[in-house]
Image (cartoon, helix red, strand yellow):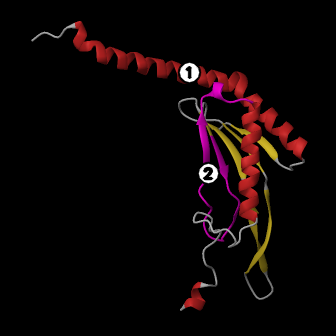
Amino acid sequence: MALTEFDYSNLKRRVEHYKQILDNTQRYRELWQTQMKTLIMDTLRQAADAAGLNCSVEDRFDVANLETIILSLGASHSGLGESVGDDLRRDLIKQNGALVYQQLFNGKILVAINYPFIEKYGQPQPPKQIAIYRPNELNPPHFVRHLEEFITEITNWEDFDDDQPATHQQIGFKINQENRAS
């Protein structure tokens, strides 16, 4: 039985869609290089300055077409320290959180929040994915809203207590509580 043009029509549509997606990837990558990277960095810096937020904004480009822009609140002393000898104490460092814009393999942009964490005090909370965007879907008001959401999440992390329990917001393992329960 010979196949007709009609028999291939569904396959042809799928192949055309596939080619369109590949073309989109190239276009998105070009947009990242020519427009988005600068737009994201400039808007984040401007918004942070306007709000009085002490942070850094940097571009990380270890792998071509997988670049990342990070707005970081840096690192600081956590106020916690571990005893490492009779008269010695080692301060534990706190990473204060970051807002991340990462170019994905297909040229789309992943926006995520990296929560603060204190070294040696439990495991870092998994990043919160805000969304994945095509470059043409993002504009300066989006970046300001992302920054607002980031600050809200970081503030909630810093102000953690049991007034409003959240199942995902455990900051550390039950250090010192496990021994008491036994």
In magenta segment, residue 135: yes
Q: Is residue 96 visible?
A: no
Relative image position of residue 137 (x, y in whole percent): 64, 28
Relative image position of residue 103 (x, y in whole percent): 61, 35
Q: Amino acid at mark 1?
A: Gln
Relative to 78, does residue 61 appear above or below in the rendering?
above
Label 1, on which residue? 26
Label 2, on which residue? 128
In the rendered structure, find residue 113 and report the number of the disc placed on it: none
Q: Is residue 174 visible?
A: yes
How many neighbours does mark 2 have within 10 angstroms: few (below 14), some (14-19), or many (20 or more)?
some
Residue 4, by quadrant, is top left
- Residue in the picture at 68% in, 25% down: 33
In magenta segment, residue 29: no
Residue range corresponding to the magenta coloring: 111-139
**How far is the residue under mark 1 from the one under mark 2?**
27 Å
Q: Is residue 5 left or right of residue 33?
A: left
- Residue in the picture at 90% in, 48% down: 52
Q: Is residue 42 left or right of residue 122?
A: right
| Of 139 and 93, the residue lying toward us | 139
How many neighbours does mark 1 have within 10 angstroms: few (below 14), some (14-19), or many (20 or more)?
some
Q: Amino acid at mark 2?
A: Lys
Do the residues bearing badges 1 and 2 touch, measured as CB atoms within 8 Å? Answer: no
Residue 167, by quadrant, is bottom right
